[in-house]
Amino acid sequence: MNAGDSEGQSGVAEAESGSRPRLLDQVRARMRRLGLSLRTEEAYVGWIRRFILDSGRRHPDTMGAREVEAFLSRLASHGQVAASTQNQALSAILFLYREVLGVQLPWMDNIRRAKRPERLPVVLSRAEVRRVISRLHGLPHLVCSLLYGSGLRLLEALRLRMHDVDLGRCEMIVKHGKGGKDRRTMLPASLVEPLAQQQVRVAEQHAVDLRLGVGRVQLPGALARKYSGASRELRWQFLFPSPRISRDPRSGDRGRHHLHECSVQRALKQAVEHCGVDKHATCHTLRHSFATHLLEDGYDIRTVQELLGHSDVATTQIYTHVLGRGANAVRSPLDGTERG
């Protein structure tokens, strides 16, 4: 730990005075009780610590709307952070006041969130999708094929468990998607065999991990307490496991988490560069392309909305103004890329 970290932690400790648990520990405990993800926990704790230090190490009890708005303004003017980053910082601070300190103040509702600029999504043509995916290999190839073939977000794909995929029905369940919602979506027929082979590889690796005593996996919510042996079961293992054994920061158990998103992002970036696609294409671009190509094929926009998991059809409408021609069944655009 460097001197800056030590000074920062001592400053936060001043704001966590008293016999009660330290403030940031209270934040962590409350977030875990509500079942929020570790990623959200780390982000919120980081913003709350930064808010306290940036406000002269004062306890949040002594601050209000003026300090919150000043903090957000400094992020925008000096930090030049994006609107989404400002809104995440505000969400963390509001969580602190409402959920941890139990403070309901009128000024909370008057703080306006930063307006995100409306930008059209980057979309690849079918030929470009085929070229990019053909440059990928191994798990990145399979994951990116799923992003385009089913319209998943990257983390939705990486968090798939073995039992979330039904190869016989060509469908899968996306659990705890954006907004904490579950949804059912289709599985491209062309990916049934590759995914079946992936499941065999996961089963073989899991058998080895069990023999080595490291076959546990992190379970969502309170399932680990409710079903003590579930973390060792094959059906709960990630469909795209990490190549390395790691330690769960909450339980301390050693096991295999899912593949890190950076490995897929790096592989896709290299593939885009190597195949000469002159667009700023990311993993999310494959999801945009999925939606756009379905609409081009005449599928109803509400069908696409359901497959994407959008709460409001207005979010789906950004892809195209094509509306109306409903379909009784949906075929993934991945199964028809040869037309492209």
Image: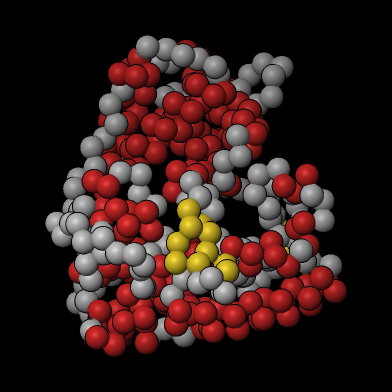
Image spot of residue 311 (x, y percent): 35, 44
Seen in the image, is 177 located left or right of residue 337? Answer: right
Seen in the image, is 76 located left or right of residue 332? Answer: left
Work out whether 104 lies above or below 325.
above
Image spot of residue 156 (x, y percent): 48, 59
What residue appears at the point 75 percent right and 48 percent down from the top-left corner?
Answer: 224
Judge whether residue 123 can be spotted in this image.
no
The total of numbered circles placed on residues is 0
Work out whether 155 lies above or below 221.
below
Colour treatment of the image: secondary structure
**Closer to the camera, 133 or 291?**
291
What residue appears at the point 25 percent right and 79 percent down from the top-left corner?
Answer: 126
View extreme (front): residue: 328
Judge whether residue 89 can be spotted in this image.
yes
View extreme (left): residue: 321
Seen in the image, is 213 located left or right of residue 267? Answer: right
Name the image quarter holding the C terminus. bottom left
Seen in the image, is 316 located left or right of residue 311? Answer: left
Image spot of residue 329 (x, y percent): 36, 67
**Closer to the camera, 329 or 9?**
329
Q: Quadrant of residue 99?
A: top right
What residue appears at the point 32 percent right and 57 percent down from the top-left corner?
Answer: 303
Work out whether 78 lies above or below 220.
above
What residue appears at the point 19 percent right and 45 percent down from the top-left corner?
Answer: 117
